[in-house]
Image (tube, grey):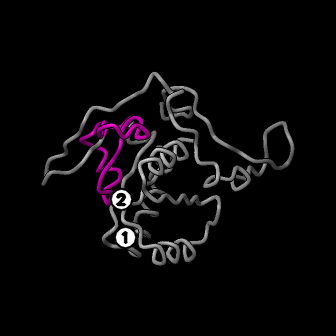
Amino acid sequence: LGLGYLAATIKKAGHEVNLMSWNMDPSVSNFSKLLRENQFDIIGIKTFTKDVAAANKTIRIIKDSLPDAVIVVGDPHPSVCDPGDVFLDLPESNYVFRGEAANLNGIHGLVWRDGEMVRFNEPFLSSDIDGFDMPLWELMNPKDYKVPKIPGGPTYGYSAPLIATRGCSSVCA
């Protein structure tokens, strides 16, 4: 849901927003075509620790299709990494957000390179999540997120991941 909240904030600020998930269309050629046809200036990638290798492959596809696009990586993995180490994990990203990027009143949590140095702003964690705009559901159809087998349940289903805590729900915590 984090991308939906961020998309709502970006749209409210007057910018065009597009969301794409590998769950929607896992074709590399279709993704490359989407990139070339739309010529995005900035592309954000949500990254869990378990998905760092996949994020790097995605970044490589983006760089091959749009060499001048700015790549911003955020969400759980960069949020738990030491700012000085995050570009070791995601070397082709241009910027990283730590914490909640849905609050764009300033650029809290931004990590960037300055020559050989890595600089960063402290992350922001809001205690007023009711103040966030509703996710842009028109860009995120839960039926695009199919679950092949729900343990103890039906043989198929749909998923809308929600992390209701301030930490990783997996073994990376």
Q: Which residues are magenta?
A: 80-109
**Can you give x and y, in whole percent of width and height, for residue 115 in the image?**
12, 54
Check the image and report above or below for 137 versus 131.
below
Q: Amino acid at mark 2?
A: Ile
Q: Residues within 10 Å of mark 2 (few under 14, many from 20)?
A: some
Name the residue that disc number 1 marks: 63
Which residue is located at x 56 percent, y 32 percent? 169
Please give left or right for residue 164 compared with residue 156 in the image. Answer: left
Front in this rendered view, residue 21 or 126 = 126
40 vs 139, left or right, is: left
Q: Which mark is residue 117?
A: none
Residue situated in front as seen by the camera: 82 or 44: 44
Q: Main secondary structure of the magenta part?
A: loop
Quadrant location of residue 150? top right
The N terminus lies in quadrant: top right
| Residue 79 coordinates in the image, percent (x, y) | 39, 37
Q: Give the mark nearest the N terminus, 1 or 2.
A: 1
Q: CA distance from mark 1 to mark 2?
A: 9 Å
* x and y, in percent, of residue 122 in the image: 27, 32
Three-letter code, disc 1: Lys
Vertical placement of residue 120 versus 91, above or below:
above
Say few, some or many: other residues with alpha carbon within 10 Å of mark 1 (under 14 / 14 to 19 / 20 or more). Answer: some
Task: Please state if 20 lies on the left or on the right of 153 as rendered.
Answer: left
**Picture coordinates of residue 26, whole percent (x, y):** 62, 66
Residue at image mark 2: 71
Residue at x 51%, y 46% (from the top left corner) = 8
SS class, disc 2: strand
